[in-house]
Image: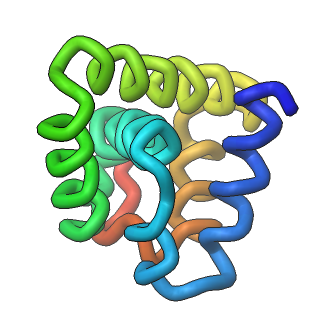
Amino acid sequence: MHMRAALRLFVAGLAFVPLAPVRAADCATMLHLHGYLTVAHAKCGLKEAPEVVDEASACRTQLGAAAATQMATDGIRFGEGELVEKGGVAAWCAFVKGKYPSLVSGKARPR
């Protein structure tokens, strides 16, 4: 399965489960998710769940900075692409806030 399709399925499933299963995710997926949520922070002002940040940090330690950075960068690119697909910053911010309430907090303020 293509990484983009796999991440869509993974991220879509997160809206329906508590955060605990996210912690069990493999490091590649976790770092990709962290990159995706970094876009939500930069573009929307949303705060990433501390558990995701902690897991991404542990994965970075485990895999090394270069590999972790590449995986997170892939997530950033995915988020930026989805932002365009959803019709721009305001629409994407509302989408992320509504779809992933266990992963982000704060009021979405498109920047």
23 above or below 70? below
Of residues 79 and 33, which is closer to you in this image? 33
Relative to 43, does residue 9 appear above or below in the rendering? below
Figure label count: 0
Query: Which residue is the extreme one toward the front?
Result: 62
Where is the C terminus found, in terms of image quarters? top left
Residue 64, horizontal then vertical, whole percent? 18, 24
Q: Quadrant of residue 85?
A: top right
Front residue of this view, candidates 110 and 97: 97
Question: What's the residue at 25%, 44% (across, down)?
Answer: 59
- Point out the residue furthest to the right here: 1
- Which colour style is shown? rainbow
The spot of residue 73 in percent (x, y) is: 40, 19
In the image, 19 versus 90, the foreground residue is: 19
Is residue 109 shown left or right of residue 64?
right
88 or 97: nearer the viewer: 97
The answer to whether residue 110 is seen in the rendering is: no
- Relative placement, left or right, of 101 versus 38 is right
Q: Is residue 44 visible from the viewing direction of this image?
A: yes
Quadrant the N terminus occupies: top right
Residue 109's place in the image compared with 83, above or below, is below
Residue 60 located left or right of residue 15: left
When the figure is inspected, residue 76 is found, relative to residue 94, above or below; the finding is above
Return the x and y of residue 68 as percentages of the image width and height.
29, 26
Who's the residue at 33% across and 38% down the image? 38
Look at 31% across and 56% down and name the residue there.
46
